[in-house]
Each structure stands twice: as structure tokens, then as C-alpha cells.
């Protein structure tokens, strides 16, 4: 009883992976526009380093064109000089290089002034494509999880059962200082959190944390399926039971001696957990998949500098 198998909450982890993928994608796009160092060499060449990229060396004669335009950020306005080479491109910003005037004078001696246009190197285009593919795969995995973890809706009420054990810890859950529920930890089931949700009860739960006495027996009302599948393990777990908030068990009644006694008002409305809403999940994540497709088309249409 004291050993609880741990099943990760993939419902939350997959969303974090998805958000992390977008952060990586935006970070890479941002890094392409960040020039961190420029060194003038004595052999008619210079080296330039973009953020998170290795320095590359070029001859001044490889400069094809340039464009200067005003730009702005949260710190103020500045001038932005874009240099187009035969096999690369980079940006010099007046708010990042103190010798901007000198660099501008040096680089604009070569090539010709043109209207601004976005370009990519071959390596940058390949990386962006792989990042978009990876992000799309993460979205599809999230959608697939929604269907795999979903349990069919049952029209009959869920049978309930009582569990008596010693309460070890009582913790309030708050969202922006608003009480959303109370979590109990029991001595016999340390790997589980027994959640008393505020929206389940008519009673105010503001004083519940202080009313419950730790290290004393407490009786909780919970779904019989949670008791049999997770606690006493007499029934098999579904995919959703394992990987969607496995360790959290919803509580519909709390009783401890004569000083704590609360009961959910509509026990006949308690249903078995369906875990996910796959249709809603598909609609929301499908929009992100559409963004990836737009990103793919945008990258595909960008000119590749140095390409024939």
C-alpha cells in the first residue's frame, strides 16, 4: 500500500513540450537577426558572428547589397543596416554597436543600396523547416493523446465509496489569492493527493484547512473506480487513468469526528472521469497546426541567399 507506481501527467507535460517548441522556434528566428561581433581583418576580409552561430569570414567584395532603415524596440528607436553577401547576410543596429557610423561607412562602400527584403541562408532555411516539422509532430502527438486518454461518457452516475485513513497534511490551493480547493495527504497513500474542489461543494472551504486535524483519522467520499483502480488496485487502469492526473483523486465528502462534515450537494451527478475533450483539443491544436503550415509556406517563399 505504501508503494505507489508513478505515472507522469502527460496531459500537462505534452503542453509544456509544445510551448517549449514554440519558444525554441521564436528564439532561433530572433537569433538570426542578432549580430554579436564583427572583426575587421587586415587581409581585405572581415568576420561576423550571429547569435548562437559560429563566426564566418568573408571578403568585402562578397557584399552584394545593403539596406538601411529605421527600426524601434522597447528601449527606443535606432537604425538598422542589413548587409547582403553572396552566401550570408547579417544586421548591424545602431543601438548595439557604438561604432555604427564607422561600420556603415565601411560596408556601404561595396554593393548597392536596395529596398529591404528578408532572406535566409541555406542552413537557416533547413533548420527552420526541421523546427516547424518537429513542432507539427508535437501538435499531432498532443491531439493523439486527447483521443487515447479519453474515456467514453457514461450516462449512469459513478458509484461512490468511503475511505478512512489518517490525514498527514492539509494544503490550500489558490489561484491569484482565490481559494480553488484543499488538498489532503493520507498516511497510507503518500503518493496521492485527495482534492476537495471548491466548485464541488456548496459549503465555503475557507476554514476547512484549519478545521481538519492532522494525524487523526478522516473519512473521504470518492469514486469507487478511483478506490479500486488506484488505491487497492483490483481493477485495471485505462490509458487516461494512468497518464492524465493519475495521482489526483477527487473528493465528494469529508468527515472527521463531529467538527468536520461536508458533502457535495448532487452526488447523483458525479460521473466517471472522461479525462480529455478530444474534439475541443483538436480544434484548439488544429489552429496551432495551421500556424505551422503558414510558417512553412512563409519560410518556403523566402529567397535563399547564395542559391542559383
Image: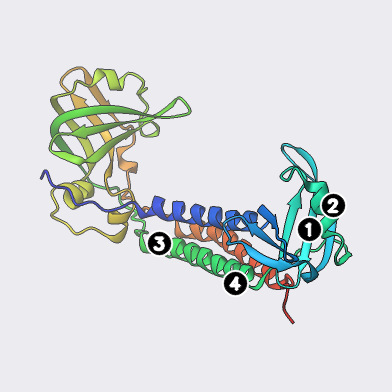
Q: Nearer the viewer, residue 227 or 28?
A: 28
> What residue sits 15% from the left and 21% below the top?
257
Q: Nearer the viewer, residue 29 or 45?
A: 45
The C terminus, quarter of image: bottom right
Task: Indicate which disc residue 126 carries.
Answer: 4
> What residue sits 53% from the left and 66% below the top?
136
> What residue sits 26% from the left and 53% below the top?
7
Identify the residue under disc 3: 145
Q: Nearer the viewer, residue 101 or 241?
A: 101
Label located before the other in sequence (3 or 4): 4
Task: Indicate which disc residue 82 carries.
Answer: 1
Q: CA distance from mark 1 to mark 4?
A: 22 Å
| Residues at marks 3 and 2 touching, judged by CB atoms closer than 8 Å | no
Foreground label between 2 and 4 = 2
Foreground label between 1 and 4 = 1
Dot 3: few (<14), some (14–19), or many (≥20) neighbours within 10 Å? many
Q: CA distance from mark 2 to mark 1?
A: 9 Å
| Residues at marks 2 and 1 touching, judged by CB atoms closer than 8 Å | yes
Dot 2: few (<14), some (14–19), or many (≥20) neighbours within 10 Å? few
Identify the residue under disc 2: 69
Amino acid at each position: 500500500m505504501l508503494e505507489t507506481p508513478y505515472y507522469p501527467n502527460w496531459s500537462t507535460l505534452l503542453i509544456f513540450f509544445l510551448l517549449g517548441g514554440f519558444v525554441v522556434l521564436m528564439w532561433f528566428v530572433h537569433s538570426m537577426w542578432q549580430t554579436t561581433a564583427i572583426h575587421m581583418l587586415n587581409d581585405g576580409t572581415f568576420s561576423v558572428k550571429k547569435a548562437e552561430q559560429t563566426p564566418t569570414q568573408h571578403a568585402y567584395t562578397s557584399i552584394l547589397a545593403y539596406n538601411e532603415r529605421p527600426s524601434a524596440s522597447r528601449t527606443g528607436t535606432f537604425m538598422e543596416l542589413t548587409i547582403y553577401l553572396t552566401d550570408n547576410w547579417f544586421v548591424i543596429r545602431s543601438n548595439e554597436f557604438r561604432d555604427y557610423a564607422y561600420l556603415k561607412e565601411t560596408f556601404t562602400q561595396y554593393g548597392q543600396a536596395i529596398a529591404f527584403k528578408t532572406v535566409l541562408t541555406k542552413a537557416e532555411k533547413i533548420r527552420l523547416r526541421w523546427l516547424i516539422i518537429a513542432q507539427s509532430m508535437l501538435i499531432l502527438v498532443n491531439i493523439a493523446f486527447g483521443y487515447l486518454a479519453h474515456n467514453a461518457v457514461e450516462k449512469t452516475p459513478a458509484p461512490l465509496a468511503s475511505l478512512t485513513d489518517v490525514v498527514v497534511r492539509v494544503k490550500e490551493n489558490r489561484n491569484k489569492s482565490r481559494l480553488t480547493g484543499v488538498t489532503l495527504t493520507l498516511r497510507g497513500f503518500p503518493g496521492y493527493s485527495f482534492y476537495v474542489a471548491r466548485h464541488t461543494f456548496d459549503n465555503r472551504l475557507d476554514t476547512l484547512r484549519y478545521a481538519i486535524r492532522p494525524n487523526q483519522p478522516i473519512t473521504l467520499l470518492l469514486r469507487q473506480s478511483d478506490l479500486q483502480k488506484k488505491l487497492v488496485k483490483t481493477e485495471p487502469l485505462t490509458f487516461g487513468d494512468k497518464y492524465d492526473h493519475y495521482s489526483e483523486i477527487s473528493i465528494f465528502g469529508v468527515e472527521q469526528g463531529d467538527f468536520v462534515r461536508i458533502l457535495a450537494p448532487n452526488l447523483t451527478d458525479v460521473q466517471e472521469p472522461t479525462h480529455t475533450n478530444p474534439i475541443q483539443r483538436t480544434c484548439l491544436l488544429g489552429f496551432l497546426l495551421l500556424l505551422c503550415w503558414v510558417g512553412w509556406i512563409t519560410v518556403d517563399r523566402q529567397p535563399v541567399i547564395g542559391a542559383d
